[in-house]
């Protein structure tokens, strides 16, 4: 593929990662913070931004680690351990830097970093990029798109939950129960995007 | 094959070691906030190395703040007031704090990091929580699966607690468990004996701590415990009381009865104690002794299904039925329940039906 078609392919993957292949609503990855931290729009916003940042950067880092180190040595089977180590170390490092140098950014974004270190959506993005054999450019688009997709999903969910806060909900369904049902309905709605783009 | 394994292990170890050393070095330079002093309630002051969470620093200083999630910011239990030095409220704390709490500087200790000098306020009852080293001085069989353990405090020598509270007993590493675990047990001793803690423990088949207590703990052994915790306690009203318990739920009720005797409490009280068989009843003599020592106290043991060779002329059936049959003027009573969740839920249902309002039912569920 030449560079222009690479770029347009990356763009297609980017868009499809947001809508048709939404990492949360089509693959149900990263559900734990999605259910746990979606009570308020403000909190979800911070968490969503943190996820966008971490997904994009770690998928790029892991792409480099995979293609520069693991593949030449024939150690592809080690990618699980490798990716987890890299994600954990990187997130920890970023948290330390932010905390030290930007209290503002730390308060908005930094506090969420430990929550998503061991998030399966982050690892999932890195693994999908390997399975689907994405090039570097496409990986950037995929990581960013997946992050934005996750961000949109949690923003929508927290918006709904904030409105629900004053509604009467059957006792057995309060909290995670109703949240999972809403997530299911949202996933159904996102199925409506299927067929618009097939970018994998 | 051998070669691949060697390279694989080598490469992964190198990368992991490299990343780890980057983290260690950067932590050295980035997270070094120098010594910070923490002032508690304007009285006690101590200095710690900055950079860790307030919760872990306090635990290190043996100030135990309740926390169920291990500092991940999901239980909202480790609330305390931070008057100075905490920085702005973090979004991870907001969902757990009410408006009034935010205004009075309440924070979650696990989310606040120690970066500068702090001034904090810890509620008095939490300050009373300490770690105790004790020696087991007596083990007594109560029934076939319940024992009463008596411990003498060595360091600190005395404990102050509210009857109804519990302690957490540390089970050390032993043959059947490779890690230290804490389990909560209600205190059953006479609160007047300030250097004694007595526990009534029922054997849980396969339980780490109860197996340790029943099969390994010997008179003369040293154990560690911390506490006291919990808000199950006698109210200060004059309403007649009904105690309802089963199994090791005997423990806190016994402690409360001692307290009533010590303080000359004149309230009318009755105590329904449920067991399946006659041989599962315990401390019956002591309870009858309380009947003669307390102003107006009746002990009503209830046996569900006495075995054929057991003679029993007392109450039969479930404890809930006995309460329904015997409790008069239930709507004026306060109820104190202690035992398994199933029993407590059933009793609460019956009491409500008999007209006891929910705010007069106090309970401690043994889960």
Image (cartoon, grey):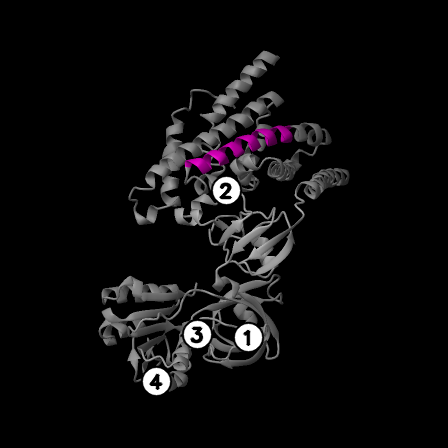
Predominant SS of the magenta segment: helix
Q: What residue did someone put label 1 on? A: B158
The mark that comes first in sequence, 2 or 4, is 2
Q: What residue did someone put label 3 on? A: B251
Q: What residue did someone put label 4 on? A: B291
Badge 1 sits on which subunit?
B
Q: Which residues are magenta?
A: A41-63
Q: Position of residue B231 (x, y in %)?
A: 42, 65
Residue A142, by quadrant, is top right
- Which residue of the protein is positioned furthest toward the front in this rendering? B42
Q: What residue did someone put label 2 on? A: B90
Secondary structure state at the residue bearing disc 2:
loop
Badge 4 sits on which subunit?
B
Q: Are the two marked residues, 2 and 4, in contact with CB atoms closer than 8 angstroms?
A: no
Q: In the rendered image, which quarter contains the N terminus of chain B?
A: top right
Q: Position of residue B137 (x, y in %)?
A: 57, 80
| Badge nearest the viewer, 3 or 4 | 4
User: In the rendered image of this protein, does residue B39 appear above or below residue B344?
Assistant: above
Was residue A58 drawn as part of the magenta stretch in this picture?
A: yes
Secondary structure state at the residue bearing disc 1:
loop
């Amino acid at each position: 593929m030449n560079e222009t078609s690479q770029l347009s392919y990356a763009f297609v993957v980017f868009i499809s990662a947001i809508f048709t292949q939404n990492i949360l609503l089509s693959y149900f990855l990263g559900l734990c913070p999605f259910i746990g931290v979606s009570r308020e729009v403000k909190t979800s916003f911070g968490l969503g931004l943190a996820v966008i940042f971490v997904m994009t950067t770690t998928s790029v880092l892991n792409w480099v680690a995979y293609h520069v180190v693991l593949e030449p040595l024939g150690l592809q089977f080690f990618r699980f351990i490798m990716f987890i180590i890299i994600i954990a170390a990187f997130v920890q490092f970023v948290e330390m830097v932010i905390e030290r140098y930007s209290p503002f950014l730390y308060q908005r974004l930094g506090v969420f970093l430990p929550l998503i270190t061991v998030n399966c959506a982050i690892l999932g993005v890195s693994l999908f990029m390997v399975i689907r054999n994405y090039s570097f450019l496409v990986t950037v688009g995929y990581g960013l798109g997946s992050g934005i997709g996750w961000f949109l999903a949690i923003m929508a969910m927290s918006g709904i939950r904030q409105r629900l806060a004053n509604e009467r909900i059957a006792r057995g369904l309060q909290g995670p129960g109703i949240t999972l049902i809403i997530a299911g309905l949202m996933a159904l709605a996102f199925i409506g995007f299927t067929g618009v783009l097939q970018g994998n | 094959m051998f070669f691949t394994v060697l390279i694989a292990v080598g490469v992964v170890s190198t990368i992991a070691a490299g990343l780890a050393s980057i983290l260690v070095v950067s932590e050295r330079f980035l997270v070094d906030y120098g010594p910070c002093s923490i002032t508690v309630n304007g009285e006690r002051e101590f200095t710690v190395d900055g950079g860790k969470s307030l919760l872990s620093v306090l635990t290190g200083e043996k100030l135990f703040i309740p926390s169920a999630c291990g500092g991940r910011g999901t239980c909202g239990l480790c609330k305390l007031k931070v008057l100075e030095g905490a920085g702005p409220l973090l979004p991870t704390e907001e969902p757990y704090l009410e408006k009034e709490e935010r205004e009075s500087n309440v924070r979650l200790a696990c989310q606040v990091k120690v970066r500068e000098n702090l001034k904090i306020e810890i509620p008095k009852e939490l300050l009373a929580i300490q770690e105790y080293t004790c020696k087991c001085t007596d083990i007594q069989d109560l029934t076939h699966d319940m024992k009463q353990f008596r411990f003498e405090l060595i360091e600190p020598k005395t404990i102050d607690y509210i009857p109804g509270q519990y302690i957490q007993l540390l089970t050390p590493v032993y043959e059947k468990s490779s890690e230290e675990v804490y389990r909560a047990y209600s205190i059953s001793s006479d609160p007047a004996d300030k250097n004694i803690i007595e526990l009534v423990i029922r054997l849980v088949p396969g339980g780490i701590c109860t197996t340790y207590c029943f099969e390994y703990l010997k008179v003369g052994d040293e154990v560690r415990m911390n506490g006291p915790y919990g808000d199950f306690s006698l109210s200060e009203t004059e309403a007649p009381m009904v105690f309802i318990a089963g199994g090791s739920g005997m423990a806190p009720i016994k402690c409360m009865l001692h307290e009533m005797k010590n303080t000359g409490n004149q309230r009318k009280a009755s105590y329904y104690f449920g067991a399946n068989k006659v041989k599962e009843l315990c401390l019956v003599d002591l309870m009858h002794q309380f009947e003669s020592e307390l102003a107006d106290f009746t002990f009503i043991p209830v046996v569900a299904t006495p075995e054929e060779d057991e003679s029993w002329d007392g109450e039969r059936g479930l404890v809930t039925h006995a309460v329904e049959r015997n409790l008069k003027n239930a709507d004026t009573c306060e109820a104190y329940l202690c035992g398994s969740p199933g029993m407590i839920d059933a009793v609460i249902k019956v009491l409500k039906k008999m007209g006891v309002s929910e705010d007069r039912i106090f309970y401690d569920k043994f889960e």
